Amino acid sequence: MKTEEIVFDVKKLNLWYGENHALKDIEFKIMKNEITAIIGPSGCGKSTFVKTLNRMTDNVSIARTEGEVLYHGRNIFDEKLRVEELRTKVGMVFQKPNPFPKSIFENVVYGPRIHGIKDKKVLMEIAERSLKHAALWDEVKDRLNDNAYGLSGGQQQRLCIARCLAVEPEVILMDEPTSALDPIATNKIEDLIEDLKKEYTIVIVTHSMQQAARISDKTAFFLMGDLIEVDRTDVIFTNPRDQKTEDYITGRFG
Amino acid sequence: MRKEYLKTIKGMENQMLEMALKSEESIEKAMKSLISRDLELAKKVVDDDIIINNMEIQIEMDVIRLLTLENPVARDFRRVSSVFKIITDLERIGDLAVNIAKLSIEIGEEDFIKPLVDLPRMYEMVREMLSNSLKAFVENDMNLAIKVAEKDDIVDDLHLQINEELLQMISKNSEIINQAMKLMFISRYLERIADHVTNICERIIYIETNEVSKHEF
């Protein structure tokens, strides 16, 4: 029985976009080496919640937060905390693959380079390790200097995951990472997520309830800024406690 | 709202209830044929069993299709999976009714070795259990399901009592052994039907509680 370690401890988190109260008194613990899926209808606050975890919401000028998000006990809103440091530890993968218009190699080593690593041999090692972790190495090892735009959508998404892994994060946030991909590419990403769980903590926003059921350990249901229910995924999909969760997952909504 | 999906689940449940009524009708006819010596009626039970069997196949296909295509979860899944299990019990109930009907045919025009009192009583109880279990399913009434299942003990006792009585009669007069054995089997089949009804009740409890367990009924 492994001891459960809390990575994120969210306490009474509130977020407003101007007048719009987007997150309401969220209480949430995210555990190490677990996959947490966030589900809920559009506009329920699930993406906002995930973006708050590495302070991507800082980029929205009208966003204002209250409450605490403790990352290993430290409040991420603390003024002394450097946001770059947080984002190194808490990486993010987006809905649409967003590689840079550079070579495959340069995409992966972009982060390490910014952190001052110049040694070509070290960068090569990082690239190989990250691409292998992202299950892309075998497909691209012979064309690392090709432009990343030449890759398929699924490959581009795995490249973005490799880029995220290159700076050795602890947590990977994923905002609908497969919604722009076909089923085969989706399967590859899902397999990859399961593999990554051994070493990383993953939070994934998904519109696919079946995806949440397939890959996650915990599932959280958001509705209109409220966290309605979070529980073991098998409990959520067999016997949720809240009628609103039941109505949502069985398609009785709206 | 997944309108078609919800309609499909409802339709599937209605089909199951129709199958249940058919099974109930089979027991009723089988017992009536025995009590009133109506061999034609017994024959009809045997012949009509194929209708129940076909219903089971049809519902099974529908359930498989729904599970594959619609991925029901939570309460929907519990209901659909319960239909999948319950139709097996209903099909077995139909078979047991056929067994009773066949014995009724075998007894034929013979006089009864004793007036039938306990078997009709047992049948009334089993029939009521079955129809109440269906009522509990339709009305999501777990308490009724528990009450029905608890009656299984009374049926078991009646079965033992009937066996006891017939064995005593046999020990006094071995000539009646043939018919006595048949009546003992009929009692046994009724008792088995009550067991299947108990299974149905357990599914209703599962739908309400999400717990699968063999209860102490």
Image (cartoon, coloured by chain):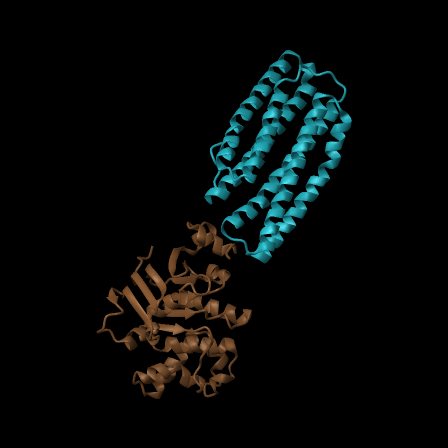
Q: Is residue B185 above or below residue A91?
A: above
Residue A244, given in percent of the width and then of the height, sits at 44, 53
The residue closer to the viewer here, B7 or B34, is: B7
Q: Is residue B118 above or below residue A34?
A: above
Residue B215, given in percent of the width and then of the height, sits at 47, 35
The quadrant in which residue A168 appears is bottom left
Left or right of A234, for residue B109: right
Q: Colour of chain A?
A: brown
The residue closer to the viewer here, A54 or B211, is: A54
Quadrant where the N terminus of chain B is found in the figure? bottom right
Give the farthest residue toward the left: A80
**Residue at x-position 40% and y-position 63%:** A35
Give the farthest residue toward the top: B172
The quadrant in which residue A26 appears is bottom left
Left or right of A130, for residue B99: right
Residue B90, given in percent of the width and then of the height, sits at 62, 38
Q: Colour of chain B?
A: cyan
Q: In this view, does A94 lie above or below A246?
A: below
**Residue at x-position 39% and y-position 62%:** A36
Q: Can residue A160 be seen in this view?
A: yes
Give the farthest residue toward the front: A19
Count all numbered tags in the image, as a single digit.
Answer: 0
Residue A148, given in percent of the width and then of the height, sits at 47, 84
Q: Is residue B212 visible?
A: no
**Residue at x-position 74% and y-position 28%:** B42
